[in-house]
Amino acid sequence: MSRGILFVLSGPSGVGKGTVRSALFERDNHKLIYSISATTRLPRAGEVDGVDYFFKTRDEFEAMINNSEFIEYAEFVGNYYGTPKKYVEDQLAAGQDVILEIEVQGAAQVHKMFTDAVFIFLAPPSLKELRKRLEGRGTEEDDVIAGRLETAIREIILMSEYDYAVINDDVQTAVDKIQTIIQAEHYRVKYIEDSLKNKILLDTLGGN
Amino acid sequence: MSRGILFVLSGPSGVGKGTVRSALFERDNHKLIYSISATTRLPRAGEVDGVDYFFKTRDEFEAMINNSEFIEYAEFVGNYYGTPKKYVEDQLAAGQDVILEIEVQGAAQVHKMFTDAVFIFLAPPSLKELRKRLEGRGTEEDDVIAGRLETAIREIILMSEYDYAVINDDVQTAVDKIQTIIQAEHYRVKYIEDSLKNKILLDTLGGN
């Protein structure tokens, strides 16, 4: 059995990573597992522990850091966010594709540990639209929003480090594009050449 | 306007490159231009000069080689095959995607000249099936077929040099997969980051 592929969906805060990931998982034609992140930020209305995030105290989170239990973690606007390692590694080894939905800061760390991972940058249609989305959330102060927009500009310039970029203009269109990328990646020689060579060449020995 | 993408469809002789490429062009949702090859082999029944190939004499072909008029050329089972350069370069510069359908030997040369080209290896389901297809053509002698099968084994091992591999088991399924690859490649950061960064960041300056 071949190893699963690790997809990393990232992009500036407010671009709609969570919405796009949810819409992707609402479709019945995907075969992805979502890796749930841990965070020290407080739950927003409707968010459930163990479903949206593993909500941790600062002490709990720092103990996990010290035990090297994260693929990546980042401190972002005063809170920690991180991806627990064991679950992802087990799923990939079992041939299961996994998608991470993480902050840009964390994506760089994943790049070092999983060189074969596929990095998808979710981009806002414009910074103006990004500001509107951050304000619309109604959870952040003005100076936090200003800080996030500054960070977003730096992150948009860094999209060069990613494999693919998808504009989140319309959620369903963005999901279509991400599914196309996921499907195409499965035809990459690097993932399939061993099984393909065996299949083609072994069939011959038996068949002639 | 951004440059077009060069797709290279290749694979062992007899795998069905021509059939798959024709089926792709019969669809009305593709935006590819096919680069017609030049060859010194004789036309098969139904093949038309300037449509299927530019049929050349050996002297004519060698004059084109000496004038550096080819992206790639190869001598294959006693005949020359080559891709005229100017047409492909003009189309890419005009933002048009181009697909080449060429022998494996030629694909390696394209790789050197067009480092950004996307290489798709069309693989037979098995060597047994490949032999059947070569025999079914009825145009080749037994020893020619044996030689092509030996070449095919070497070429299948070399698929590592390609970006993608697609098995030509069912023609329409193979075309679906190739179209998915073509679409996904258009979301690659390396092709779109400049226009995307301009679009996102410039919109802001005007809009705030």
Image: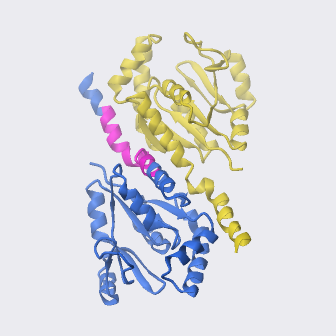
Chain colours: A blue, B yellow
Residue shown at 72%/26% (left/top)? Answer: B64
Q: Position of residue A88 (x, y in %)?
A: 31, 65
Q: Position of residue B198 (x, y in %)?
A: 69, 63
In depth, the one of A186 and B23 nearer the eye is B23
Residue shown at 46%/72% (left/top)? Answer: A103
Q: Quick check: is B115 in the magenta stretch?
A: no
Q: Name the outermost residue toward the left.
A: A206
Q: Quick check: is A195 in the magenta stretch?
A: yes
- Magenta segment main secondary structure: helix
Q: Name the outermost residue toward the bottom.
A: A59
Looking at the rendering, in which quadrant would you find the C terminus of chain A? Answer: top left
| In the depicted structure, whether residue A54 falls above or below residue B122 | below
| In the depicted structure, whether residue B23 falls above or below residue B188 | above
Residue B162 in sight in this render: no
Q: Name the outermost residue toward the right.
A: B67
**Quadrant position of residue B201:** bottom right
Q: Position of residue B170 (x, y in %)?
A: 39, 28
| In the depicted structure, whether residue B10 falls above or below residue B191 | above
* Residues rendered magenta in the picture: A181-201
Q: Position of residue A89 (x, y in %)?
A: 30, 64
In depth, the one of A207 and B74 nearer the eye is A207
Residue A22 in sight in this render: yes
Question: For the image shown, how many numbered marks are present on the structure?
Answer: 0
In depth, the one of B50 and B71 nearer the eye is B50
